[in-house]
Image (cartoon, grey):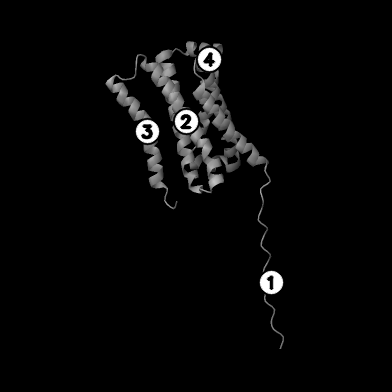
Amino acid sequence: MKDPRFAKLVVLVNGLVPLALMAWDAWRGKLGANPVEYVLHMSGKLTLIFLTLSLAVTPIRKLTGANYLSHFRRMLGLFAFYYGFGHFMVYVAFTKLFNVREVIADTIERKFILLGMAAFFLMLPLAVTSTNSAIKRMGAARWKLLHRLVYVAAIAGVSHYWIGVKADTTLPMAFAVVLAILLLYRIVDALRPHSRKPAPAPRSSPKRAAI
């Protein structure tokens, strides 16, 4: 794909569709009996969906050779953070009414809240350093090392969802299985000896024909 701008626009529009639908339903009063709980759960699911999609880019790119997919990884990761930020703000604003003491107490007392907080605050530095200028300032090696926190954030996020679900754990289990496959692929790929192309032999200057 020589020009990924149109494809990026498609990803951007599709990433905003769930937000637009929730806003439309909120305006019509169609968020159900408990609107706060609905938005809280939906934003959390969207966070995990986009986080999982961002982690799936590299394995799919390597397995299929579709290198153009790397153009979308950053956008998918940022959507995961934005929906995670919305999830966090709905919790703080509407369930705790910005009461910092209650938020801290809830985080200490309930394990799944602690895991959710960990996932969000691990994604925060990744979102802040998602620009090209941040990569230049930090250097590629340190930037890559920092962004490995996404794996920890994903594990914490899926665990937060699984523990927080009281009844049907089918969807959290599906997220956990997909995440396990993506992480296992990375481990296997890191341990696999990658073949290196041999360096081309130096060209010898042509010998002059004997007279």
Q: Which residue is mark 2?
A: 49
* Residue type at numbered disc 4: Thr
Query: Which element is circle 3 on?
Result: helix
Query: Which element is circle 2 on?
Result: helix
Name which of mark 4 and mark 2 comes first in the sequence. 2
Mark 4–mark 2 Cα distance, whole angstroms, equals 24 Å
Q: At 41% from the left edge and 43% from the top edge, which residue is drawn?
A: 8
* Residue 148 visible, this orientation: no
* Residue type at numbered disc 2: Ile
Report the disc number at residue 34.
Answer: none
* Residue type at numbered disc 3: Leu
Name which of mark 3 and mark 4 comes first in the sequence. 3
Q: Is residue 202 above or below residue 88?
A: below
Q: Is residue 203 left or right of residue 103?
A: right
Name which of mark 3 and mark 1 comes first in the sequence. 3
Q: Which residue is mark 1?
A: 204
Mark 2 or 3, closer to the camera: 2
Query: Image quarter for residue 91?
Result: top left
Mark 3–mark 1 Cα distance, whole angstroms, equals 59 Å
Q: At 70% from the left edge and 78% from the top edge, which residue is drawn?
A: 207
Mark 3–mark 4 Cα distance, whole angstroms, equals 30 Å
